[in-house]
Amino acid sequence: DIRPAIALMLFAGIRVEEIYRQNAGKGEDVLRWEDVDFAHEAVYVRSDVAKTRVARTLRKLPPNLWTWLPMSGEKKGPICTVRLRERLEAARKAAGLTKWAKSILRHTFASHHVAAYGNLSATALLMRHEGNVELLNRRYREGVHITEEDGQRFFQLAPDVPKPESNRHAA
C-alpha cells in the first residue's frame, strides 16, 4: 500500500528518498512507522533518513495528513516496502501525464502550503529550507497560480471512508 507514502509526500513534504530507497538496509535508513507520532501529530525524520543528514521534527502538519495515515494496517517497520519510484511512474502513465518532476509531490505540498497558510517561514521550516526563504518564494509562490482557497481545499482532501450503518430498528 503506497497511500501512506503518498500522503506523507503530499501533505508533509517528505522526500521520496526519505520514504523508500532501493538499496536501503533493513529499513534503518528510511522513514518507519515508529517515526510517526500519532499522539502528538508529529513526524520524526532521523538523520540517517534525511537527505541533509540533519534530523528534523515535523509538527503543525495539515490535519488531513492524519486522515490518510491510519488507512494502512501494519504500523511497524518501513512505511513503504515496495519500489516507490516505479509505482509513482506507473501512476503518472495511468493518469496520462507525460512529464513529472522528480519531487513533484513534495513541490505540490510546498506550493499549496505557501498558498494556504501564506507563511513562507513555516513552509521553509517543514521542508528544511529555513535558510532559503527567497528560494521558496521564487519556486512556490511567484509564478504559481494557486490561490489561498485552492491551498485550503488541498489540505481538506481526505479519503472516502465508508460511514457506519445506522442502527435501524424494525417497526
Image: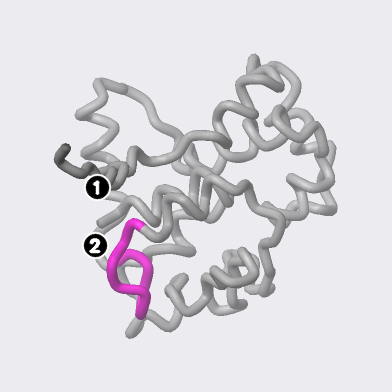
Disc 2 to disc 1, C-alpha distance: 8 Å
Q: Main secondary structure of the magenta part?
A: loop
Residue that mark 2 sits on? 82
Residue farthest to the left, as pictured: 170
Q: Earlier in the sequence, mark 2 or mark 1?
A: 2
Place of residue 118 in the rendered image (x, y in percent of width and height, measured from the top left): 80, 32
Residue 7 position (above or below residue 108): below
Quarter of the figure that contains the C terminus: top left
Which circle marks residue 87 in the picture? 1
- Give the residue type at disc 2: Val
Residue pictured at 61% horizontal, 64% vertical: 41
Q: Which residues are magenta?
A: 71-80
| Neighbours of disc 2 within 10 Å: few (<14), some (14-19), many (20+) | some
Tag 1: amino acid: Arg
- Check if residue 46 falls in the magenta segment: no
| 122 or 135, nearer to the observer | 122
Which one is in front, 37 or 141? 37
Label 2 sits on a secondary structure element that is loop
- The answer to which image quadrant residue 162 occupies is top left
Quadrant assignment, res 91: top left
Give the side of residue 94 with respect to residue 50, left or right.
left
Total marks shown come to: 2
Q: Position of residue 87 (x, y in %)?
A: 24, 47
Q: Residue at x 64, y 29 (%)?
A: 152
Q: Position of residue 89 (x, y in %)?
A: 27, 40
**Residue 75 colored in magenta in the image:** yes
Q: Residue furthest front?
A: 171
Residue drawn where x is 37% and y is 25% of the image: 99
- Labels 2 and 1 touching (C-beta < 8 A): yes
